[in-house]
Amino acid sequence: MLGIIGGSSLNRIPDLVNPRRVSVTTPYGEPSAALTAGSLHGTEVVFLARHGDSHTVAPHRINYRANIWALHAQGVRALVAVATVGGIRDDLVPGTLLTPDQIIDYTHSRESTFFDGGLQPLQHIDFTRPLSAAVRRRLMQAGAAAGVAMRDGGVYGATQGPRLESAAEIERMARDGADVVGMTAMPEAALARELDMDYALLCVVVNAAAGRGANADGVAIETIKAVAEAAMLKVNVVLAGMAEQHGR
Ligand code: HPA
């Protein structure tokens, strides 16, 4: 089963046929919202709005464990997580779509594992390649087939939020090798890996990161929403193509 997690500006999949709301409780508490199951171009998909149905759950307050557990319990084994990001690298301008291949985690104080010796025994997982090459390839193919330009690869730096970063924090991230910055891929990606799900990110650059390019003196927050909403039209085309392939 294909799962889709929607981020800011994507709290539903408009093309979903026969949508059904599925409320799930998990040993880790409540997910951000009820899941929505339905058919997307002939493939059964399950959708979850990461920040809740009306975008009320802050990145550091998301119950990532409940979200990933709920999707897994519905049979999801391949997962596309849509996330808006700031562009650190100069060529990753607002409106760019990319599927990163690496992650650096700068978050803290989040419940970030199932394997903490509580409900599940302590266990270490391999995270050398944190994002699924197979799902990333399928995203790239869906983009190419639909004529939607997408960048293949890149390093996603996950920050705590909800505030944006200082210019010096972004400078440090650039030195670390981060290409984009967002607030939600961790611990989401690691939890998916713990449950053996194939997880990849579909990122939308919605602003130049703090201190970069047009945002040298401050991030123009008021421009972000319009950029995100316009880009989600392209995201929906890629997701539809991905679902179509998945059904074949
Ligand atoms: N920083 C962190 N997260 C983000 C940004 C940003 O500039 N833009 C969108 N999500």
Image (cartoon, rainbow, N blue to C red):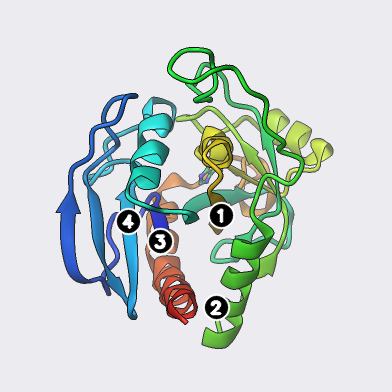
Q: Quadrant of residue 158?
A: top right
Residue farthest to the top?
118
Three-letter amino acid code at the position of disc 4: Phe
Left or right: 103 with respect to 145?
right
SS for callout 1: strand
Q: Indicate whether 10 appears above or below 146.
A: above
The CB of the residue at mark 3 lies under 8 Å from ligand 1: no
Q: Quadrant of residue 30?
A: top left
Tag 2 residue? 142
Three-letter amino acid code at the position of disc 1: Leu
Numbered tag placed on residue 1 in the rendering: 3
Residue at figure coordinates x 39%, y 37% from the top left: 69
Residue at figure coordinates x 54%, y 17% from the top left: 121
Task: Give yes or no for contact between labels 4 and 1 (Cβ–Cβ under 8 Å).
Answer: no
The tag earlier along the polypeptide, 2 or 4, is 4
Mark 4 nearby-residue class (10 Å; few <14, some 14–19, many ≥20): many
Tag 4 residue? 47
The tag earlier along the polypeptide, 3 or 4, is 3
Mark 3 nearby-residue class (10 Å; few <14, some 14–19, many ≥20): some
Three-letter amino acid code at the position of disc 2: Ala
Of tags 1 and 3, which is closer to the observer? Answer: 3
Residue at figure coordinates x 65%, y 50% from the top left: 131
Give how far across and how far down residue 159 sits, in percent. Answer: 58, 32
SS for callout 4: strand
The tag earlier along the polypeptide, 2 or 3, is 3
